């Protein structure tokens, strides 16, 4: 076996023109739109770079070499490569003619150090009080879905929230590509896999989720729900696996529930919509909505609790915390505002009190 470090060096060799970015902790993404147009994301902002590949041919060879190294193929019949490098970084490449301008590559660097709750607070993504509240939500085993757009900080938030899980619990983490990294000692990491060149050997999130139920998990963390696995997760959440966590791509708390519904319908399990809604409403207890602001910062915009279904079969939510923007700094452009309590208490407030868990002072006082 080739040691990972050597492997990584070889891969960096293929990607020599952008190797300096792949070595740079402050860079989160390298985006190659053909040989002459290379952007990076740093601190949430996209910058164009002067890096270049010598030619389209050189870029294509680099991607083919990477594919070969990780045991995959990219060619006219299989023009999309989604591969993980030994250091956890993820490479997605799409070749012509599927990509109009030729080889397009995006490399998501795997952060060696995940953002902690303290760092997220320092960045203003959540407040001291909302942190206390979320900690209690995790401790009383509410199911939590973190929702937001691409790059809004969902995975980072999921990772941070997972740090509240008590260290004596057995946690199973299921992902498409490893991003979540926990401090707890008893964590099992599972990763899905696309089919090989012969179309065999695929392991889906659903396969892993079903197998996980037999692994005696105390908590299930699903990195991201993007398809039919949403139904399996919802069913796990309502059948004794409270305290599960996941992320979903959606913009507002209500959308999040509707998005989950759509994903569940992708599962090919026939279920009347009213029954499905009932399950989603009782499965998802807390929605943490994240957003990428104009200044590149990521914030929690809402913390909402699902309270059930209305008589008409619509989801009912109560917003517990909400971000209110008060302005922006005229010099730096930084947005200003607060993630404030709305005055509503969660339905499980008494449980939080009786267990003597962290309670934001504002909630206690009233
Ligand atoms: N609260 C935050 N403040 C600053 N940067 C953040 C914050 N949350 C995430 N990031 C950075 O933004 C990028 C995308 O975050 P990620 O959690 O992967 O988003 P998503 O899962 O929504 O796509 C990463 O580089 C991450 O380090
Ligand atoms: Mg993510």
Image (cartoon, helix red, strand yellow):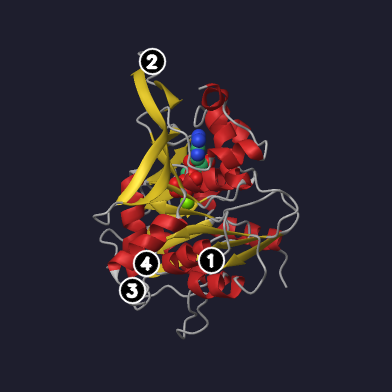
| Residue 79 image point, x, y percent | 36, 71
Q: Which residue is mark 4?
A: 264
Describe the element under mark 3 as helix, strand or loop: loop
Please indicate whether residue 171 sits to the left or right of residue 227 in the image.
right
Q: Which residue is mark 1?
A: 239
What residue do we see at 37% from left, 61% from top? 278
Q: Is residue 155 visible?
A: yes
Residue 271 bears which disc, if any? 3
Residue most extreme to the top: 330
Tell me, yes or no, whether the two marked residues, 1 and 4, touch with CB atoms within 8 Å: no
The quarter of the rendered structure image containing the N terminus is bottom right
Question: What is the CA distance from the residue labelled 3 to the residue labelled 4?
Answer: 9 Å
| Residue 129 image point, x, y percent | 55, 27
| Mark 2 or 1, closer to the camera | 1
| Mark 1 or 4, closer to the camera | 1
Q: Is residue 28 visible?
A: no
Q: Decide which of tag 4 and tag 2 comes sooner along the chain.
A: 4
Question: What is the CA distance from the residue labelled 2 to the residue labelled 3?
Answer: 50 Å
Q: Decide which of tag 3 and tag 1 comes sooner along the chain.
A: 1
What residue do we see at 54% from left, 52% from top? 16
Tell me, yes or no, whether the two marked residues, 3 and 4, touch with CB atoms within 8 Å: yes
Q: Which residue is mark 2?
A: 329
Beta carbon of the mark 1 residue lies under 8 A of ligand 2: no
Residue 356 bears which disc, if any? none
Crowding near the residue tagged with mark 2, few <14, some 14–19, many ≥20 C-alpha atoms within 10 Å: few
Looking at the image, which is closer to me, 328 or 290?
A: 290
| Mark 4 or 2, closer to the camera | 4
């Amino acid at each position: 076996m080739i040691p990972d470090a050597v492997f990584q060096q070889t891969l960096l060799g293929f990607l020599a023109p952008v190797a300096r970015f792949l070595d740079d902790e402050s860079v989160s993404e390298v985006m190659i739109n053909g040989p002459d147009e290379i952007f990076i994301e740093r601190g949430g902002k996209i910058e164009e770079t002067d890096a270049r590949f010598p030619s389209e041919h050189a870029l294509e060879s680099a991607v083919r070499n990477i594919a070969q190294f990780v045991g995959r193929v990219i060619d006219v019949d299989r023009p999309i490569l989604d591969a993980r490098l030994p250091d956890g970084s993820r490479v997605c490449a799409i070749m012509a003619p599927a990509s109009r301008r030729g080889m397009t590559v995006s490399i998501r660097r795997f952060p060696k150090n995940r953002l902690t709750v303290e760092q997220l607070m320092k960045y203003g993504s959540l407040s001291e009080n909302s942190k206390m509240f979320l900690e209690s939500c995790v401790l009383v085993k509410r199911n939590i879905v973190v929702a937001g757009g691409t790059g809004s900080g969902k995975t980072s938030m999921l990772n941070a929230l997972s740090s509240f899980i008590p260290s004596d619990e057995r946690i199973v983490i299921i992902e498409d590509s490893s991003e979540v990294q926990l401090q707890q000692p008893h964590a099992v990491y599972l990763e899905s896999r696309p089919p090989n060149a012969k179309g065999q050997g695929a392991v889906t999130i659903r396969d892993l989720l079903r197998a996980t139920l037999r692994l005696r998990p105390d908590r299930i963390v699903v990195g991201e729900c993007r398809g039919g696995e949403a139904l399996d997760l919802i069913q796990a959440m309502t059948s004794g696996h409270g305290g599960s966590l996941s992320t979903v791509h959606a913009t507002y708390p209500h959308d999040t529930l509707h998005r989950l519904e759509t994903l569940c319908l992708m599962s090919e399990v026939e279920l009347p919509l009213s029954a499905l809604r009932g399950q989603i409403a009782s499965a998802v207890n807390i929605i943490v909505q994240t957003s990428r602001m104009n200044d590149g910062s990521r914030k929690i915009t809402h913390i909402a609790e699902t309270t059930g279904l209305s008589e008409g079969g619509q989801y009912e939510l109560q917003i517990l915390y909400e971000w209110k923007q008060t302005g922006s700094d005229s010099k730096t452009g930084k947005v200003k505002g607060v993630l404030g309590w709305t005055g509503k208490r969660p339905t499980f407030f008494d449980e939080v009190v009786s267990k003597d868990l962290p309670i934001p002072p504002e909630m206690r006082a009233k």
